[in-house]
Image: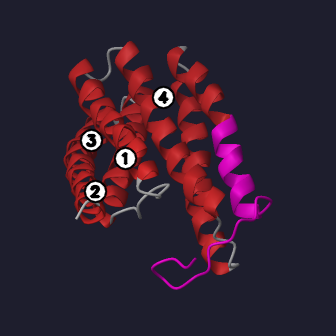
Amino acid sequence: MATAQGQVVSNRVVTVPNALSFLRLLLVPVFAVLIVQGQDGWALLVLAVSGASDYLDGHLARRWNQVTRLGQVLDPFADRLYILTTLLGLGYRGLVPWWLVVVLVARDLTMVATLPVLARLGHSALPVHFLGKAGTFCLLYAFPLLLLGQVSTTLALPAGALGWAFALWGTGLYWWAGILYVQQVAQLWRAEHR
């Protein structure tokens, strides 16, 4: 199988990019504890390490021809887990409103609801749309900026403004991509049942 860029997708499990994705997943509970305990500086550091490894695993996978099916699942899963953990932690501390948590979790639940349909049609997942990547990118920048506003009183205003801009744009793009994804699933379903 090949990606849109023409790279072959392998079934390998042990690769450097997959190890980086696994490391990101191992840091999720550490991050969760830090954010709930209000250790915002350390939580921000873990998010920065996670973000750097997120970029690095994708870059290395393409550069070293180590794009794998496992990596295609682990990478977005880690992204979603960080977004969810950050949302719940910030919601728990009253730093983001619960309506934002509900809106973003509802989008992910909508995506999960399509998985049985995809499986029935013989697909494990559909390719990630550019809008989904852009929405995830915005959200992965939004929450560290909101945390940065808690760490530094000097940066609180600009970090908060930028954080909320990224959060709102990211939420819109996230849902737009979700709608396109559901439309793709519906098209596959109709094509299968013609």
Q: Residues within 10 Å of mark 2 (few under 14, many from 20)?
A: some
Q: CA distance from mark 1 to mark 3?
A: 30 Å
The reply to whether discs 1 and 2 touch (Cβ–Cβ < 8 Å) is yes
Q: Position of residue 64 (x, y in %)?
A: 70, 78
35 relative position to 25: left or right:
left
Q: Which residue is mark 2?
A: 189
Q: Which residue occupies the foreground of this view, 143 or 61? A: 61
Name which of mark 3 and mark 4 comes first in the sequence.
4
Q: Position of residue 158 (x, y in %)?
A: 27, 42
Relative side of 183 to 67, left or right: left
Q: In the image, what residue type sits under mark 1? A: Val
Mark whose residue sits in front, 3 or 2: 2
Which stretch appears magenta?
1-26
| Three-letter residue code for mark 4 | Thr
Q: Which of the two labelled residues, at mark 1 and mark 3, occupies the earlier sequence position?
A: 1
Residue beneath disc 4: 85
- The residue sitting at 65% across, 51% down in the picture is 21
Identify the disc placed on residue 117.
1
